[in-house]
Amino acid sequence: MVMCLRTWGLRIRMFLVVALMFALFYALIAAVMYFMNINIPIIYVAVAVFIMGFQYILGPKLVDFVMRVRYVDPYENPRLHNIVSRVAAKAGIPMPRVGISDISIPNAFAYGRSMRDARVCVTKPLLNLLDDDELEAVIGHEIGHIKHRDMLIITMLSVIPLICYYIYLSTLFSGYGSRDRGAAAFIIGLAALVMYFVTELMVLYVSRIREYYADARSVELMGQPEAMASALYKLARYNVTRKERLSEEEIKKLEYIKAFLAVKPSYSVPRELLVLMEADVNGDGKIDSYELLQLKEKIKGAIGLKSRIIEAFSTHPNIVKRIARLAKYIN
């Protein structure tokens, strides 16, 4: 009950943004129908249905291929299977398929057409990097995405900016009929371009909210905010300490599904990461409850304007803010 009260704000924010996006999209379609007096909006609907249908049917297979996912049975990796099974049972969802991705950085992701078709995958380095409590917390995060059905939500929302951009291309320079209709087409095209940027930012905002929400679900299921914080810290710190760099091929693959990863892949060292490393007072490479509470105080004023701007165009929250937020769930 306490956790539900702490997450109601995230749920309301997500609902309001989704409602606003569809309202804006409806207004744009209505404007096209009114000013152009043609049946082009039917094309937009058809395009939206086609894109969502394509993602629904082929999306999981594409992720399997791009991320080189190999599904494993309980005998091949009993540790991973036992953790996924335990967390799924606590969440009250069907057991997802369990896979291992052959990508060289530690991460995890969940995807699928529905709750019954869900898959939870981790990369090989993640299994070596995290202890059982931390791995359980990360799996809880991924199970949270499945429980919230936000994989479907983010897929549906991502179509709206694409349709807005299509409207922009098909109306701004179309020059329909008379001068009045041509002017109306230009105005609608310009509005569609603005809507494209606005709705794209809104999709990213919803994506960041869903990450906070999945973190909260993990804590609700496993009851260990410090384990989730420690896992995120290790994943972020890995980017600093690793000696090898990601290949261009791997970066492109990670960009393809970055919205579904537990942590946004980082190819540079953010300044705020130093705050995290300083929070690890005893230098054991983990974040305990005391260090997490201290981090909550240290972070005030540590996030600069540049980082806030970068975050606004990101699928994931600022990693330091995200970890510090977990302190609110410590009883």
Image (spheres, rainbow, N blue to C red):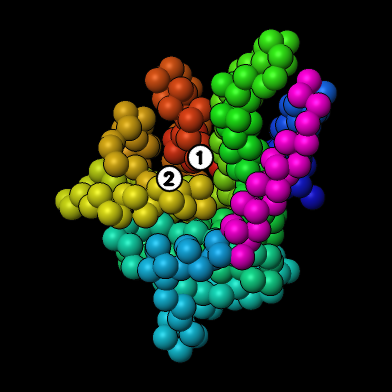
**Residue located 52% across and 52% down the image:** 260
Front-most of residues 31 and 77: 31
Q: Name the disc covering residue 315, or none.
A: 1
Q: Which residues are magenta?
A: 35-57
Quarter occupied by the C terminus:
top right
Is 259 contained in the magenta span? no
**Residue 218: percent from the left, percent from the top?**
60, 55
Q: Which mark is residue 264?
A: 2
Give yes or no for contact between labels 2 and 1 (Cβ–Cβ under 8 Å): yes
For the view shown, which residue lies furthest in the bottom direction? 75
* Residue 203 at least partly seen: no
How many numbered tags mark residues here? 2
Can residue 306 be spotted in the picture?
yes
Q: Is residue 187 above or below residue 164?
A: above
Judged by its main secondary structure, the magenta piece is helix
Mark 1 Cα shell of 10 Å, populated few (<14), some (14-19), many (≥20): many
**257 or 164: which is nearer to us?**
164
Residue name at image x 69 percent, y 40 percent: 44
Q: Earlier in the sequence, mark 2 or mark 1?
A: 2
- Mark 2 is on which residue type? Lys
> Which numbered tag is attached to residue 79?
none
> How would you rate the neighbour count of disc 2 (Cα within 10 Å): few for under 14, some for 14-19, many for 20 or more?
many
Q: Is residue 154 left or right of residue 244?
A: right
